Amino acid sequence: MYEATFRLAGCESGSGCGSEPEFGSYDAITAAFDARLSLWCNDHSDLLLLECETGRREAALEAIDAFAGIEDAIVDGSDAVAVTGNCVKALEATVVDGILDEHGCLLLPPIRYADGARSIRLLALESAHLTHCYHDLLEDFDVTVESKRDLSFDSLDRNRTPDGIGEPLPALSRRQRQVFAAAYERGYYEIPRETSMAAVAESVGIDRRTADEHRRQAERKILESVAGRYLE
């Protein structure tokens, strides 16, 4: 069994997607509001996790509501969880599902949207199935292979998930990556510290308060991704 993660770009401008609302795809919404979306798709509605700056959260939720309809939402700081009124499959004239079916590839949720593109995680019994899927997707999207691995029985980590197919490393937003990388590279985590968050914020080109928020979000995601292994 083989696993691959493909990043699909090109939907922001309508390629492979519907384009009736102002924001015709979740890809476009993430680009407009510097947000990240994780989507668990159902037949009649979807579950969304929205991550973006607090000051842009309400506008991003309004764009999601205009695109898919929001039945209910829970907001916590810069994060929000929403249940949509429509399934994304009914809103986008996407060719992805047909290509996956044709090549026997299984989509593993969630679909992750960020920076005007989406990342899909696939399983296939043969490596060639993923290769053929990749080439067909190239006809409608700009495709980047973010990861690919052989899921042999020896490689399965059953301490992470019951089936051993663990989630990849946590996905950070562009700003979270920028701030965390700058903080790490400039010695913010050294003892004693070799820089301040004010200096980190200046290097990234944002204010200190916003940089602190992105740093905390990045730290939380990274910590949650590894903490379970050591607390069992």
Image: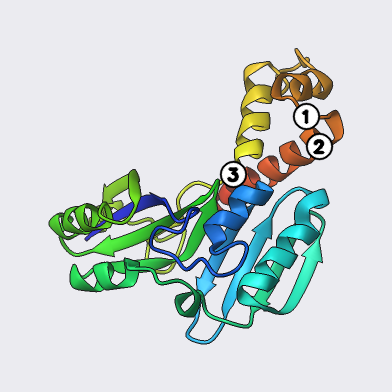
Q: Which disc number belongs to residue 232?
A: none
Query: Label 3: few (<14), some or many (≥20) within 10 Å?
Result: some
Label 1 packing within 10 angstroms: few (<14), some (14-19), many (20+): some
The answer to whether the residue labelled 1 contacts the one labelled 2, judged by CB atoms less than 8 Å apart, is yes
Q: Position of residue 155 (x, y in %)?
A: 29, 52
Give, as a three-letter code, the residue at label 2: Thr
Question: Compared with residue 88, is residue 49 higher up or lower down, i.e. above or below?
Answer: above
Q: Earlier in the sequence, mark 3 or mark 1?
A: 3
Residue annotated with mark 3 = 172
Dot 1: element: loop
Residue at the far bottom in the pictured view: 44
Q: Where is mark 1, residue-wise?
A: 206
What residue is at 51 percent from the left and 66 percent from the top?
A: 19
Gap between marks 1 and 2, in whole Å? 7 Å
Q: Decide which of tag 2 and tag 3 comes sooner along the chain.
A: 3
Tell how many labels.
Answer: 3
The amino acid beneath tag 3 is: Leu
Q: Which residue is mark 2?
A: 210
Residue type beneath disc 1: Ile
Task: Pinpoint residue 2: horizontal percent, then vertical percent.
Answer: 24, 57
